[in-house]
Amino acid sequence: MKKLVNDLQRVCKILELIAAVLVFIGIVLAIIGLFWSDIHAFEEVLHDTTAFRHFLEKIFEIVIGIEFLEMLCHANPDNVIHVLIFLVARHMIVGETTPYEDLVSVLSISILIVLRKYMHTNNKKPGTPET
């Protein structure tokens, strides 16, 4: 029975690695596509705010993809919280939001930061100084 569990864990690690490689390929293609698709994208960004918002949205998608890749490679609660913070921030910055939605987003990010701080203080051994 223990051998079966070990085999399943190895299969899961291999599947996670395959998913990470696919996400990495997607990130590289997204970065290439961001600059390849339109040479004049930067000129449009200078003259049109909607083009800037579209460009910012694409950049945030790439950053979230990179954070997701890091979460796949180094699975821990801290990386999950980073991804969630980026997702909420992206929604608040790029999306068309109401003041109420902005308030909820700020509160969500604050709770995630407090949770992250709480997780770090709980992982310290008694007697070690705070950083």
Image (cartoon, grey):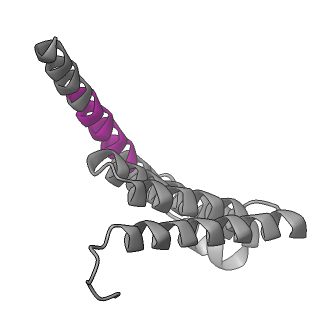
Q: What is the x, y in percent for residue 52?
A: 66, 69
Does 110 appear above or below 61? below
Tell me: 105 left or right of 125: right
Tell me: 81 left or right of 100: left
In this orientation, does residue 13 appear? yes
The image quadrant of residue 58 is: bottom right
Tell me: 6 left or right of 69: left
Q: Is residue 42 magenta?
A: no
Q: Nearer the viewer, residue 34 or 122?
A: 122
In this orientation, does residue 51 appear? no
Q: What is the x, y in percent for residue 86?
A: 55, 62
Q: Return the residue found at the far left.
A: 3
Q: Residue at x 24, y 35 (%)?
A: 17
The image quadrant of residue 110 is: bottom right
Q: What is the x, y in percent for residue 46?
A: 64, 79
Tell me: 10 left or right of 39: left
Q: Return the residue found at the far front.
A: 126
The image quadrant of residue 51 is: bottom right
Q: Residue at x 52, y 62 (%)?
A: 59
Magenta region: 14-27
Does 106 appear above or below 36? below
User: Which quadrant is home to the N terminus?
Assistant: top left
Q: What is the x, y in percent for residue 55?
A: 59, 63
